[in-house]
Amino acid sequence: MNTRRAFLGQLSAISTVAAASPLAAADAQPAFTDDRAYWLSQLMRVAEPVLANMAANRLKETMPVEAPAVRNNGRRAVTHLEALGRTLTGIAPWLELVGKIGGEREHGRRFAELARRSIENATDPKAADAIDFNANAQNLVDAAFLAHALLRARRELWEKLDPAVRKRVVAALQSTRKFKPGANNWLLFSAIIEVFLATVAADWNEAPIQLALDSHEKWYKGDGVYGDGAEFHWDYYNSYVIQPMLIDVVENIGRVTPKWNALSSRILARAKRYAAIQERLIAPDGTFPVVGRSIVYRCGAFQLLAQMALRNELPERVSAAQVRSALSAVIHRTLGATGTFDANGWLQVGLGGHQPALAETYISTGSLYLCSSVFLPLGLPDTNPFWSARSADWTAKKVWAGQNLPADHSMSRA
């Protein structure tokens, strides 16, 4: 108990420093040295309100529904599944990590239990926080994020569920088949749900997987970037959805059938190039270009870079230490700004604070929790070089400090 209190105190102190840090100066940097403790403090700060309240059947009662671009809180029917699925997809690798030590182990156990109780309540029709997975087509999206989380933490978030709860989860995911995705990144939502169902020996359909993979092969634009549909869009959807789900769709369905295995090497080669681009997008102060829709997902814009770090598959000449340092700066800028959280700890709409005008019509409070996907490398043990290596400057910081680095080059079409 003393260890836990000490660790909680450490994380609380780090959170306070991060939340209070002024970000007006262009070179503002975190005022702490233990990156893993800082990342954990921020992940738990984001996840605690969602999982603690849903585990207690109080999420619908307590979570505000800020939807600036929609009148009368028109997103209320979907926002709670958004909050659950998106929180879990980011926290899942940390929950699944074996060998946590000290206070981190105790926190991991607690959050895993909260997550399982949340899933139980979400799928229990008698629960106060029961979710109608058929309420709106948006639920296809967030059922997919839930499925992605279950794939990322099969032991903690699936195998440890009561068998009756597992049956309800399968039925809920299968029920979203009524929603037909458009010809864009939404194809991957249907695909990853079917992949999860296949991996747990439930009834699954091959066609959505085939369509998603065939379509994204057609939509590949070159140099590590896919179109969101037939057209290219300047936004972060290659990282929010497309590349992380392509990787996990092909890898996980490969455990069931070898039919799509030939795509794996191309998908990973493209992901490595896109990860290299993402690392170069992070400015010396931790900011990044404010372009495209869904920018209020904050540090979730770097899910793909985080995922490649988790997989130990970063590009050549991009070290784990420089990615950790760069992402720490991004987390600091996007979660440490005044106004990021309300007085009760809930995320508010914005990128560098509370900025409701940045919201599209589909954005509500639950949507914002995709920021949790930046924390995927917490699924690596603290002995991994991602955590154990000394902090290092990232590409933009090196170049703007005058270092003489090799030029960047595009990749050949793969």
Image (spheres, rainbow, N blue to C red):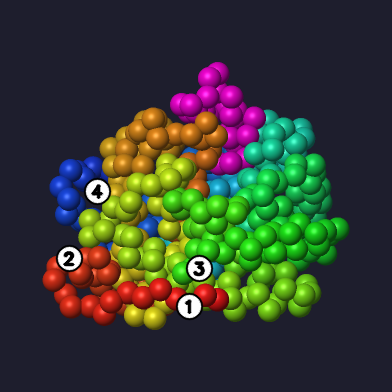
* Disc on the earlier residue, 1 or 4: 4
**Cα distance, mark 3 to mark 2?**
28 Å
Which type of secondary structure does the marked residue at label 2 adopt?
A: helix
Front label number (1 vs 4): 1
Viewer-closest of 218 and 339: 218
Q: Nearer the viewer, residue 245 or 333?
A: 245
> Marks 4 and 3, Cα distance to the nearest angstrom?
42 Å
Q: Which residue does the numbered mark 4 point to in the structure image? A: 17
Q: Which kind of residue does numbered mark 1 sit on?
A: Ser
Q: CA distance from mark 4 to mark 2?
A: 27 Å
Amino acid type, residue under disc 4 in the picture: Val
Q: Which mark's residue is nearer the viewer, 4 or 3?
A: 3
User: In the rendered structure, are the residues bearing label 3 and label 2 in contact, judged by CB atoms less than 8 Å apart?
Assistant: no
Position of 177 with respect to 104 (left or right) is right
Which residue is nearer to you in this view: 200 or 261?
261
- The residue under the point 60% across, 47% down is 85
* Picture residue at 33% right of the left edge, 60% below the top: 281
Residue 112 visible in this rendered orientation of the protein? no
Q: Magenta part of the protein: which range?
A: 58-83
